Amino acid sequence: MTAERITFAALLAGTLARWRGAIVVATATVALALGLSLVLPPSYRATASFVTTDAGLKMNLGGLGGLDAEPGLAGIASQFGLGSGRDPSESPAFYDQLLSSRELLTRVLLSRFADPRAPTVADSLTLLAILRIHDDDSQRALETAVKQLRRKMRVRVDLKTNLVVLTIDTRWSRLSADAANRAVALVSAFNKEQRLSRARARGDFLATRVAASQTELRAEEDSQRLFYERNRSWQNSPGLMVEERRLRRQVETANTLYLSLRQQYETARIDEVNTTPVITVVDQAVPPRRRQWPQRTLIVLTAAFLGVVLGVLWSAARELFTHWARHNPDDVAMLVRTATRVRQEVRGALRSPARRPAGRSTG
């Protein structure tokens, strides 16, 4: 092979001379991208958001006293790891994991929605049936649908404002909005079930403790009454005065414990029938009017830019190959002979399986 190199000016001139080929490549790229944008199924994105309730947030800042009530100090304290009395299930990060959990996604998939393919709105199917995941094993189909829905769902959380934003993409506008609202409703139902379950278990435990503390209080009061009945002049005896103070202190301690447990028990009973939502919906999902994907304008502009680049590269490659072929005719002839032989061998290999049955039958 000759070592003669092509100059930049010659390469640029040869590339510009092949401008028709570059235009053909760019036009074909744009046409292909436009065709794909027409063939690809549309995708609509619906967005719903809610705020978590943290009324029970109590920061434990040690010697900082009441500074935890100041705005912004709760977030600063959490960043420095000073601790918090907040329930982990009220954290926005918890809702991120909850919305991506298999249990909640399964409930969304088994929920019924208006069939977007049906002519009437009254027809409804489960989201699993709408997605049309074909599999003989129902559990395998459900598992595939969970993975697919998890890919189409995005959750963003803001730790400063406790805002959770949920977005869902589907092929149909109304289905995206209904699925997002259904997911938020399931989160609210989960929180309600969790709160009521904890309140019921706490109430059962406190009921036992209230009964035990009441029995203890009555025993202490009986001991104090018996002391007064047996020692009517206890004020004149130092030993009896010490004994009386001890009995009175035990009664006061038992009474304080009983009142505290009784108050907590009543609070737990109120929580069992409390229907206040734990999350506050900020924005309900509405059916989007414009599709999220494909965006034909963006696709065409990107394809036009890419087509111009590919056209220039194609023209430059043609010029480089022409320059090389002009100075290396023997190598070009060898490549042509090799390509011809390989093409004939491939054709023979493709035709031989079709001829073998006929040859065997004639033999």
Image (cartoon, grey):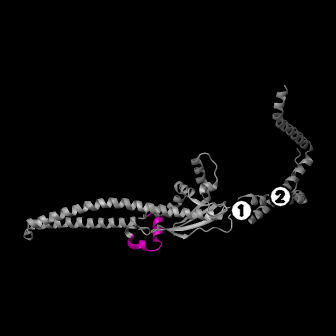
Task: Tell which of 7 and 171 is nearer to you.
Answer: 171
**Which corner quadrant holds the C terminus?**
top right
Task: Tell which of 151 and 250 is nearer to you.
Answer: 151
When asked about the image quadrant of residue 268, the answer is bottom left
Looking at the rendered structure, which numbered label has been put on residue 294? Answer: 1
- On whether residue 260 falls in the magenta region, the answer is no
The residue beneath circle 2 is 28
Q: Which region of the structure is painted magenta?
A: 64-82
x, y percent for residue 310: 81, 57
Amino acid, disc 1: Pro
Q: Main secondary structure of the magenta part?
A: helix
Tell me if residue 4 can be seen: no
When asked about the image quadrant of residue 239, the answer is bottom left
Residue 14 located left or right of residue 38: right
Residue 288 located left or right of residue 299: left
Q: Which comes sooner in the sequence, label 2 or label 1?
A: 2
Point 36% across, 65% down: residue: 269
Point 83% across, 28% down: residue: 361
Could you classify mark 1 by the number of other residues whose Cα lies within 10 Å: few (under 14), some (14-19), or many (20 or more)? Answer: some
Disc tally is: 2
Tell me if residue 275 can be seen: yes
